[in-house]
Amino acid sequence: MYADMERPALCAVPGWGRRAPILLLFVLAALALGGSTAVDAQPSATAGADQNAPSPIVVDDFDSYEAGTFPGQWVFVKRDKSTIPPEEASEPGETVEVKTSGGNGYLRVVTENEALRYTQRNGREFDWNLKTHPRISWRWRAIDLPEGASERGENDTGGAIYVTFGSDWLGRPKSIKYTYSSALPVGSVVSFGPLKVIVVDSAREPRLGEWKQVMRDIPSDYRQVFGEAPPDRPLSITFWSDSDTTGDRAEIHFDDIRLLPPFTRDGE
């Protein structure tokens, strides 16, 4: 839909979904100058927290937007590091809109034989240092997951949160992709070179279609998949959905993406 045709090459060409993780490495290169599993939704934000710890950083709670609009803090980043407005980045079969329920805003993301991604950049849309905020949390619910998809095979992902770090020695960005899998069990790890996939929720788990909360310890996950300590400042956070390999439909809702200080129990 836009001039350089990056989006169709990444997302809309039939049969390219299996290669999407590898292709995304080059797209995320534009940004690259043992956590827990899903738990019940909306736990106490201060449970077990040190009273002197820094406050959580809200990346987005989707409460500040009008219903039916695109969440303006998120951007589509091209390979040359420039951004384009969502109306240019969007393709038929993609929906990204804020919805409200009971006064609470959340993000509705739909792909139909498509793939999409939008990003917030550290130091621009938000500010993040792992020394003070090593954990990330968010809520999501899967309404539809692409049937037959697997991170190890027909690589469609109904919903994912990417955290992108630096680059490897070849200049490829290092990323962790936290997924809501159609098929793999929670805890599965799949590697695509410097892109590491960790399944944090799954259709195998109960309560599909209900809100769940995920909380991850980034340094712990990074050490697990890369075997070393992460850089202090990740480059970006991206939400993702795709169903282009299976030609199916995905719908996932996101909410309350936050960065949290270290966990401490009372008295520690």
Image (spheres, grey):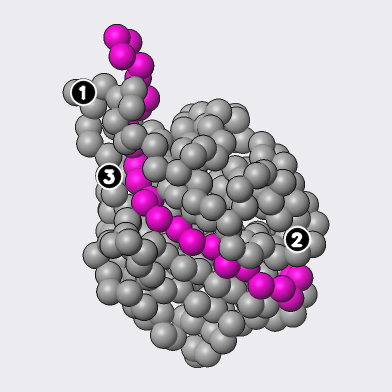
Q: How many labels does the image show?
A: 3
Left or right: residue 249 versus residue 256 is right
**Kind of residue sitting beneath label 2:** Ala
* Magenta highlight on residue 234: no
> Residue tagged by mark 3?
57
Name which residue lies at 26% across and 22% down.
Answer: 50
The stretch of residues the image draws in magenta is 245-268
Residue 268 placed where, x, y %?
Answer: 32, 10
Q: What element carries label 3?
A: strand
Residue 254 placed where, x, y %?
Answer: 45, 58
Q: Where is 116 relative to 152, above or below?
A: below
Left or right: residue 97 versus residue 205 is left
**Kind of residue sitting beneath label 3:** Ile
Count neighbours of disc 3 (C-alpha within 10 A) and say few if under 14, some if 14 to 19, many if 20 or more. Answer: some
Q: Which quadrant of the structure image shows residue 144? A: bottom right
Count neighbours of disc 2 (C-alpha within 10 A) and say few if under 14, some if 14 to 19, many if 20 or more. Answer: many
Which mark sits nearer the N-terminus, 3 or 2?
3
Give how far apart the Cα atoms at labels 1 and 3 are: 15 Å
Left or right: residue 148 versus residue 5 is right
